[in-house]
Image: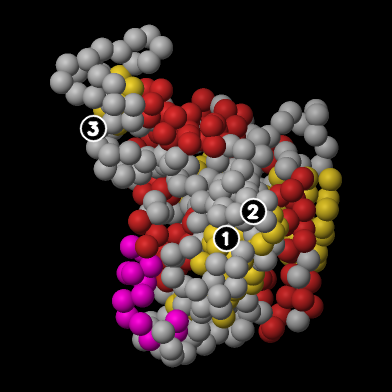
Amino acid sequence: MSQPMSSSHVSSCCILKLVCGETEVTVEQADITTCAADIVAVPVDRQFSFSHGISRCLAAAAGSGFKIEVRATVGSRKKISHKPGEVIIFGGHDLPFGKIIAVVSSHRFEDIKMLYENVLTSAEQAKASSLCFSGIGTGYLGVPSDVAAVCARMALSNYLSADRSKFTSLKHIRIVDLDTKIVRSFAKELKSLSNTCLKKDDSALPGDEGEELSLVFKDSAQGSDNAQVDQIFFSCFRRVDGLSDEVCPVCLDSLSHGSDNNVIIELSKCNHKFHEECIKQSFTCVQAQCPVCKKWYGVPRGNQPIGGKMKVRMQIGEVPGYPDAKGYFEIYYSIPGGVQTADHPRPGVPFSGTQRWAYLPNNAEGAQVLRLLRLAFRYRLIFTVGDSVTSGARNVVVWNNIHHKTSIYGGPYGYPDPEYLDRVKEELAAVGITEELFEGSHL
């Protein structure tokens, strides 16, 4: 979610307008702090601190009375942390709208649709006739705008196709943002709501009557390693005094004393000690992990060819061995061919790309593995370039030791396999992809 600007510099521009029965839905490039609505929804962190992105800007614009109300209301709940989707409604105070829906946000795409649904329900319960919100999670949490748009579309589709006798107040729903990419993503996705508006009995929840949740993820481009290392580095070490009987594991020189240019530091998780420049160079040139014990201090970096895409669809069907699954996730990978780089076995030699499909059960553990695979793909760890053991082909894109189920039914690469999800999580952890990465402040 982009930062708001002064209304004197930004004029509202309506990109999409739909009329669904008695409810109008618009997508606009506008400043949410000047939104003309009864109620505005804003994502917040688990402490309702209003210290990030749009929530921080709204809190500043709402004035001291708003801050007093937030402290009193949140303090009375006596909770250190709140779960994603929890809602508190505050007064608008100095802002041009009556109330503010604060909803605890999340970076997990399986939570985002629920957040939008809670916002719509809360607006109805507040008897608001107009609601304004933006791309939940698209700011500091980094949720891709197309993911947020898909989830908003599904929540709106369910809301607009429901029994209208239960929902009577909302007449205008405005999705606004200053970021052009976010606005375009929402406009593109919400165009399909016209089908819901014209024929309300056609809507379906993913996994219920056939609608597909289709999301596309891209890998992370190169070029930010040094900045990332700087960001990670300053959060994971502390300076220590000279150590007379130890040597630096990187350069093997004594740690008996440091200097202003090369101080001695201790890594926070494992307590191994290095010259600062030595460990920083190791983090930059090798991986952000301790060279001694291999403890990870940041996201790993792979050599998967750049430019790949990962597409996820939620499909109807059974996965043998997982009776609790509500269908399954179908993953489609597309990796383009190109020329091998210095990270590959034969630099300068062309290689062939690939297309692969894989499947995960749509249950809690399957969704967790999918989230980890998304992160592994982002950091280019799923594939590499080499020679295929199966076909014998040389200079091709191959799997990179993170095993996938490429069939739903039977065979060594299919289901049932009750140990698969645990096994693939171990493989992901071995290359540094764990749930801890989602919780770390450096991501």
Element under disc 2: loop
Q: Secondary structure at mark 1?
A: strand
- Is-magenta flag for residue 416? yes
Which is more N-terminal, label 1 or label 3? 3
The residue sitting at 38% across, 26% down in the picture is: 278
Disc nearest the viewer among 3 and 1? 1
Question: Splitting the image into 4 quarters, where does residue 117 fall?
Answer: bottom right
Identify the disc placed on residue 385: 1
Out of 195 and 179, give the one closest to the viewer: 179
The part of the image, by quadrant, that contains residue 226 is top right
Q: Kindly indicate whether the residue at mark 1 contacts the one at mark 2 (C-beta within 8 angstroms).
A: yes
| Mark 2 → mark 1, Cα distance in angstroms | 8 Å
Q: Secondary structure at mark 3?
A: loop
Q: Which residue is mark 2?
A: 340
| Residue at 44% from the left image edge and 65% from the top image edge | 402
Give the colour scheme shown: secondary structure
Q: Residue drawn at (23%, 32%), measured in percent from left and top? A: 271
The 10 Å Cα crowd at callout 1, few under 14, some 14 to 19, many 20 or more, is: many
Q: Identify the residue at horizontal 50%, vertical 73% (top origin).
A: 389
Mark pair 3, 2: CA separation = 38 Å
Q: Nearer the viewer, mark 3 or mark 2?
A: 2
Mark 2 belongs to which amino acid? Gln
Residue kind at label 3, given as amino acid type: Asn
Please indicate, yes or no, whether residue 78 appears anywhere in the rendered image.
no
Residue 334 lies left or right of residue 443; in this view the side is right
Pick whichever, 378 or 283, lies toward us.
283
Q: Is residue 7 magenta?
A: no
Spot occupied by residue 1 in the image (x, y as percentages of width and height):
63, 43
Look at mark 3 in the image and give the residue it sits on. 271
- Which class describes the residues within 10 Å of circle 3: few (<14), some (14-19), or many (20+)? few
Q: Is residue 435 left or right of residue 387?
A: left
| First along the sequence among labels 3 and 2 | 3
